[in-house]
């Protein structure tokens, strides 16, 4: 076997390991989907139980939520740009896009926390009625996921800048991209089922 | 798997469109209540397909077939959980509140 061939098999092995790791992470994402499905179901069941209090149409501001949605959508796109940089093998094209994604994600979380704080200050906290418990449970779980994604992203930015795009770093970056796009999809459903359908 | 700028831009543009369209429909009350509901849900499902295809790169090629299959399986479970819960809870509410049933017992 020539050294080229050895290198080739080694490369294939690594590639296979990468694919296995990505598939494992994909399975995790799908189980997370099930978690969200159950809390979506809880929200849908509890949604009419406002205990005489205001419903979603009175409580939520659609333009505000549209801004949140665009922040998250754009962050999904900018993370895609970072993935293009990863494909080109250029950390210098990955890092700036990750910074942009991080800032967009952080703005989303800040807006959400502000919305929650506003609702609680107005006396519509999660303990007011079953509908609001369901709302804070669902939207809060998503927000918690985004926050974890942000911590992970900060760690990955550190790793990319320190180690460059080594195989393990590139693999983790790919998994983070799956996670980030997945959260964007979950948000689309929150936007549709909680906010838009709440306003109809 | 080869990623291209074009894929991401198409996906992004489609996502924005599929977000703005239902938003406009709802804020301007451009249709009856039931058709609004249908339109909004249809936009969300289209958006799901767009993002799966353009951002998560799930497609019908053989090497991502397992990803697609596991996803479809999860989708079935999700539908059972959500609609099953709604159905059961709706029936439960119905039977708990029906006065005739309470009298006949």
Image (cartoon, rainbow, N blue to C red):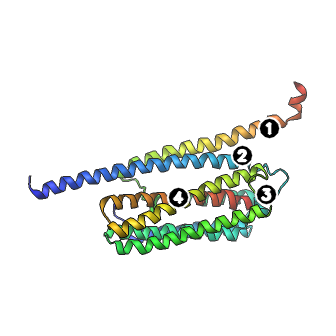
Residues at marks 3 and 2 on the same chain: yes
Please say if the residues under marks 4 and 1 sit with CB atoms less than 8 Å apart.
no
Picture layout, residue A68 above or below residue B103: below
Q: Nearer the viewer, residue A33 or A193?
A: A33
Outermost residue, top direction?
B105
Residues at marks 4 and 2 on the same chain: yes
Which mark is nearer the camera, 3 or 4? Answer: 4
Residue B85 lies left or right of residue A146; in this view the side is right
Which mark is nearer the camera, 4 or 1? Answer: 4
The mark found on residue A166 in the picture is none
Q: Position of residue B81 (x, y in %)?
A: 61, 42
According to the picture, the residue beneath numbered tag 4 turns out to be: A148
The mark found on residue A55 in the picture is 3
C-alpha separation, residue under disc 4 versus residue under disc 1: 41 Å
C-alpha separation, residue under disc 2 versus residue under disc 1: 13 Å
Q: Secondary structure at mark 4?
A: helix
Give the class, few, some or many, for how many residues have Cα within 10 Å of label 3's Cα (few <14, many ≥20): some
Q: Position of residue B71 (x, y in %)?
A: 47, 48
Picture layout, residue B8 above or below residue B105: below
C-alpha separation, residue under disc 3 versus residue under disc 2: 14 Å
According to the picture, the residue beneath numbered tag 2 turns out to be: A45
């Amino acid at each position: 076997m020539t050294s080229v061939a050895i290198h080739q098999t080694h490369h294939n092995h690594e590639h296979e390991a990468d694919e296995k790791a990505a598939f494992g992470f994909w399975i995790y994402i799908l189980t997370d989907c099930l978690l969200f499905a159950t809390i979506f179901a809880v929200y849908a069941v509890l949604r009419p139980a406002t205990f005489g209090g205001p419903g979603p149409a009175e409580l939520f501001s659609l333009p505000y939520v549209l801004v949140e949605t665009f922040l998250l959508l754009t962050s999904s796109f900018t993370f895609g740009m970072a993935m293009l940089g990863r494909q080109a093998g250029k950390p210098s094209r990955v890092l700036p896009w990750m910074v942009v994604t991080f800032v967009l994600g952080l703005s989303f979380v800040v807006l959400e926390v502000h919305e929650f704080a506003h609702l609680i200050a107005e006396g519509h906290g999660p303990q007011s009625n079953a509908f609001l418990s369901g709302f804070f449970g669902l939207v809060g779980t998503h927000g918690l996921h985004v926050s974890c994604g942000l911590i992970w992203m900060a760690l990955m930015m550190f790793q990319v800048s320190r180690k460059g795009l080594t195989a393990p770093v590139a693999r983790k970056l790919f998994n983070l991209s799956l996670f980030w796009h997945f959260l964007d999809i979950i948000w689309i459903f929150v936007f549709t089922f909680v906010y838009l359908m709440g306003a109809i | 798997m080869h990623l291209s700028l074009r894929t991401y831009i198409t996906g992004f543009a489609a996502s924005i469109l599929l977000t703005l369209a239902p938003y406009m429909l709802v804020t301007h009350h451009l249709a009856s209540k039931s058709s609004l509901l249908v339109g909004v849900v249809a936009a969300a499902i289209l958006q799901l397909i767009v993002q799966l295809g353009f951002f998560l790169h799930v497609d019908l090629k053989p090497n991502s077939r397992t990803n697609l299959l596991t996803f479809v399986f999860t989708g079935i479970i999700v539908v059972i959980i959500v609609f099953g819960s709604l159905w059961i809870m709706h029936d439960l509410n119905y039977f708990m509140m029906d006065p005739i049933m309470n009298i006949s017992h």
